[in-house]
Amino acid sequence: MSCSAFLLCLTGVLATTVGAVEWLGVAQTDTFFYHAWPRDQFHTSIPSSRKDDLLTFRVTQAGYPDPPPWLRCRPTSPRFPLSCYGHIPPQHNNNLSLEILACNRRTFEISRHEVQFRVVRSNASLPHRLEVFLPRLSIRNVARGAAFPPRTSRRPSLLSTLHHAWGARPPSALQLLDAATPRDRGKRIPPGGTGNEGVFVVFGSPRPFPPSIVGAAVVGMTGCPLRPPPADKALRAAHFAVDWCSLRLFTKSQGEGSPTSIEMRDGGDWPGGGVWGEEFHPPSPAPQTSRLVDFIVTVATAGVVALLLALLLAHVMCCRRQGRQTRDLTTAASVLARQSKVRQAATELRALSWKRGKNDQQSNKFIERPLDIRSSFGLPPVYDPHAQNTLQPC
């Protein structure tokens, strides 16, 4: 959803259509929420809208400028429906009202829809949780059941595979709790051949982790560069790609509103990063120190260096300049005689040119003067034959 495009719609709005209030039903806390609204529903609410017009959406909580913190809404494509998904936190236990504003990019008309549903507290306790990354799927695939086909399908799904490895009976004992894209986690993974970035899925179960899943997590942490498949055959039976290196096991403490405390297996730490055996203790505040001495030393050092550079530049420009007497003493006599003859010849040529220019001005005749260019333009000559010093330096 583009914020600039939606602001353009707000500034150039022609009409606002208020749609009907939609009731979604009841949702439970600590579960995965997903709902999609087709674009035809918003096209029909705008009278002058066409089916091929692009729509820009903005979803907020009624009475607030932003949506709930746990809710993520974005259209996956200009042609796909608007989808909202997220993990409902346990502390959220009341009615929720969402306001959806759809802006037509062609006519800049806005359609307002209100969606209401009730959130009730879930009685299921699922403290043991598993997170894994599915690189070739999207939120839409997960929500529509593409990642988790029913048990009547011949191909084993990840949910049925985990059911078999976990031994969770009845089927409701293992549930999908959350699904998020890498962009929701602040990451960026280039899409593969399917055009999907992938999905992080979280499952929960009341039963402890089985040895096969714990072994897959340990192998994934120790050999992630090689990306070995899990040793258990049931875990390798999934018909789609699973990044077992991203497998993470954690336990939610009972009575806490937010996850999570990491569960320790076999009395020791798991190898690899991201596993903490104790609570995090923030560092103590740094003691106050005076920065005056550091400031004085920094300024004094810079001043001394600048002064030395200025003295060096003055010595080069003033004390090392070569005068005419020093130049004549270090120059050979033959060179000085040759330079003197050149200056005398130049003086004679300039005097001749000056006389010719003076005669031409009296006779008002134009004659080419290759030896004196300034007099050709009516300018006085630089050379004056009546000057005392006729030997000008070259």
Image: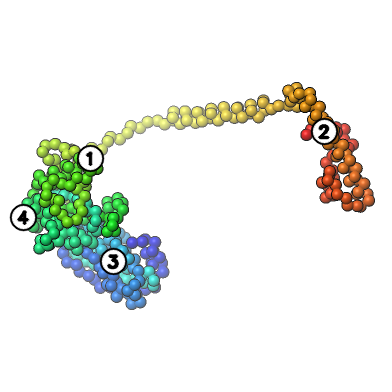
Furthest residue toward left: 169
Comparing labels 2 and 3, the label whose residue is closer to the camera: 2
Quick one: label 4 or label 1, which is nearer the N terminus? 4
Furthest residue toward top: 329
- Where's residue 161, x and y in %? 12, 54
- For disc 1, the marked residue is 273
Q: Label 4 vs label 1: CA separation? A: 32 Å
Q: Label 3 vs label 4: CA separation? A: 37 Å
| Mark 2 nearby-residue class (10 Å; few <14, some 14–19, many ≥20) | some
Q: Which mark is residue 169?
A: 4
- Where's residue 96, x and y in %? 22, 62
Identify the element where label 2 is drawn.
helix
- Where's residue 343, x and y in %? 82, 33
At 17% from the left and 42% from the top, the residue drawn is 219
The kind of residue tagged 4 is: Arg
Quadrant into which the N terminus falls = bottom left
Quick one: label 3 or label 4, which is nearer the N terminus? 3
Q: Are marks 3 and 4 in contact (CB under 8 Å)?
A: no
Identify the element where label 4 is drawn.
loop
Residue 139 shows in the view: yes
Q: Are marks 4 and 2 in contact (CB under 8 Å)?
A: no
Q: Label 3 vs label 1: CA separation? A: 38 Å
Q: Which mark is residue 343?
A: 2
- For disc 3, the marked residue is 80
